[in-house]
Image: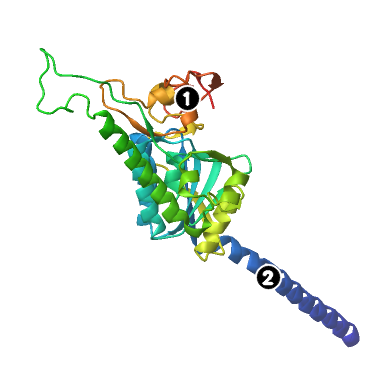
Amino acid sequence: MLSKLAAVLRRASRSYVLFIAIGLVVGLAIAPVAFQTTESDGTVAVIPLSGGITGGTSSSVGSMLEQARENPDIDAVVIVANSGGGSAAASEELYLQAKRTAQEMPVVASVDASAASGAYYTIAPSDVIYAKPASLVGSVGVLANAPQSVEPNEFIGTTGSNKLSGFDDRGFYYLLENLGNSFYNAVETQRGDRLELSRGELAQAKIYSGTQAVENGMADRIGGRQAAVTAAAEEAGLENYEVRTLRPRGETVFLSRNNYLAADAPNGQMVSSDYFMNTDDNSPTFLMLPASYLGNDGEAVEPTTSVNATRTTTPPATTAEVRP
């Protein structure tokens, strides 16, 4: 009887030891996984730059860049560009906002469909610019509708010779050249030795594919948004990180916007460059858009290709058209 009891105790003891050993192995296997999924070193913020750049776009994207600078949990920014540019003043404001952000944290740009003209101006301060092979990059320059010649008459008087027209011909072209030089200087300063184009080549306002842009120094690497996020995290020294897409403060978000979709156009329509032109007065409107958006006679190109867009607060928008 005593021998049988001893055998039972020995078997129970071995089973208990085996149970403890299995528990330790399972615990060690699970613990690192649990640690990796809960621990975060910081956050990479993704900021979309979509549609035509207007004052509203500048305000929205600028507010997101400001959020990134103010939030201590955000360690790096990725600007995802899908824009052909727009207003010169609005584009310059975004350039200054991006430059200020790049002085405080790593900023990486990802060119989706395009970063042309004012959109390229915006991302120029980025530490690294990623582009897809089929992305469109460039169109560095400024255009404007020339002022109409208006003279004082029996109905209108003026205290200055340019009060009605805003500019004489010489003053207009001097200002246009001055704005262009500011754009060229910004690109040359921000790109530095990476830029393989001369000032004259840059001023031709050519549009390049993503592959060409990497070759001539307008961009740095071939890759998409995920590659840009990874690079931004590395620049910030993050191994385990969160990715957060920022939204404008207190503003409507578009579910779908494409290259030339103007943020404040009626029903969020696709537009041509005449949307940006100021037709209410005789003053010229200075734009940072590809020159191909103007016809041979200097008029805005008429839309030809249908694209749909939807606001979050309205029914599906009407179809509008644009020529690439």
Between discs 1 and 2, the one toward the N terminus: 2
Q: Which quadrant: the N terminus?
A: bottom right
Q: Which residue is mark 2?
A: 27
Three-letter amino acid code at disc 1? Answer: Met
Q: In what element is the residue under mark 2?
A: helix
Estimate the x, y position of residue 256 in percent, counting from the top left. 51, 31
Q: What residue lies at 40% left-to-right and 50% top-to-bottom? A: 186
Per the model, the C-alpha gap separating discs 1 and 2 is 57 Å
Residue furthest out toward the top:
154
1 displayed left or right of 200: right
Q: Which residue is mark 1?
A: 270
Foreground pick, 20 / 216: 216
Q: What residue lies at 46% left-to-right and 32% top-to-bottom? A: 254
Mark in front: 1 vs 2: 1
15 displayed left or right of 243: right
Q: Quick check: 205 above or below 230?
A: above
Crowd rating for badge 2 (residues with CA inside 10 Å; few <14, some 14–19, many 20+) = few
